[in-house]
Amino acid sequence: MKPDDSPYRYKYLDGEIQLRGDKSISHRILLLSSIASASVKIHNLSLGQDVQATLNALKKIGVKTVGDIKSELTLNPLEAGSKPSRLVSIDCGNSGTTARLLIGFLSGLGIEAKLYGDESLSQRPMRRVTEPLVSMGGNYLYNKGDCLPLKVLNNNGMHGISYLMPVPSAQVKTSILLAALFSDSKMKILEKNKTRDHTERMLELAGVDIQCDGNRIELNPIVSPLNLPVEYLVPGDISTAAFFIAGALLLPGSEITVKNSLLNEFRTGFLQHFKKMGADIQILNSHTSYNETVGDIYVHFKGTLESIEILPEDIASCID
């Protein structure tokens, strides 16, 4: 089929695409910048409402910012030992990532807060986050069941434990690691199935004593603020890129290049499956940026794709 014969209104995709920052990394760089040793200027943050919810939460606990999330945002870290004098009410909107990461983060900092969200988020379970944190010394009060709203209450300090993740979850893992940063002993986590490792990579970048060996993670608590770079560029969102890549593979005549995209191995499983289906996808200019693999994704319509079988163990790297 020639491009002009395509039945679609938009006959083909052509050109270069530069996407806004990856959502998962945007959440994490905001949180870790708030406990850094110096201000961090962040470029290309995600503009999604979920990331805005995390930024608003940090402002609620006293984090100051300069600039605009749409261009560049400088985040000034919290002063050591400073925290609100009373319980803070934080609206997580529809962002499960915001809620789950904050539970561990606030517990480690010893900040009391009430976390709530919209109707949809208020139906999503949080007990799988708080259960390991309770074992570490966290203190929580649910309004009802195991969903938001919940209160993160004062605790007597967090303790490192050995924890086997019963269900793969990068959000739960990250919440535990954030709390463990402020614990009094080493934290050990064992995953049955490895999940995305953005948090581990960013903590390593910041000089945290963290060792990752296959599915095992060991983290020693920090003794000083994180040593993050003074500037940080968030790579393009690979999840958003997936829609453009799929479109280019479906529309005859398409040829696109997604520039400066995140290429973390735990996020690019769908690219490998597309290739198995016969897609013409090439990775160009692959390099390491702030401890993450980043590069350009070239996609060219080649023809009808073949069906393949995707196994359960392949799903984690295809999520989103």
Image (cartoon, rainbow, N blue to C red):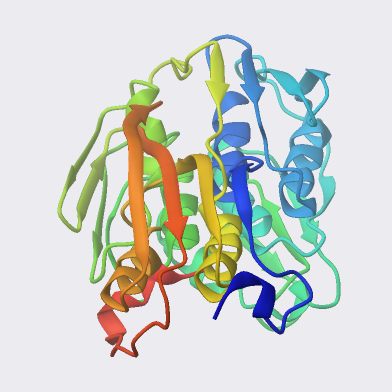
Count of labels in the image: 0
Question: From where the camera sits, is residue 160 visible?
Answer: yes
Which quadrant: the N terminus?
bottom right
Query: On the rendered structure, is 40 left or right of 76?
Result: left
Q: Position of residue 255 (x, y in %)?
A: 52, 55
Eyeballing the image, is 316 above or below 202?
A: below
Q: Residue at x 83, y 24 (%)?
A: 68
Can residue 133 be seen at all in this image of the molecule? no
Work out whether 206 lies above or below 303.
above
Q: Identify which residue, 234 or 36, lies in the foreground.
A: 234
On the picture, is 265 further left or further right than 300? left
Q: Is residue 129 shown left or right of residue 269?
A: right
Task: Find residue 195 and report its image quarter.
Answer: bottom left
**Residue 252: quarter of image:** bottom right
- Residue at figure coordinates x 32%, y 79% from the top left: 277
Residue 52 picture location, percent across and down: 78, 44
* Residue farthest toward the left in the current orientation of the protein: 213
Q: Relative to 200, is 297 on the left or the right?
A: right
Q: Residue at x 79, y 26 (%)?
A: 62
Q: Position of residue 130 (x, y in %)?
A: 53, 65
Position of residue 103 relative to residue 62, above or below, is: below
Dividing the picture into quarters, in which one does residue 39 lie? top right
**Pick the front one: 2 or 149:** 2
Relative height, residue 89 to residue 314 (above, below): above
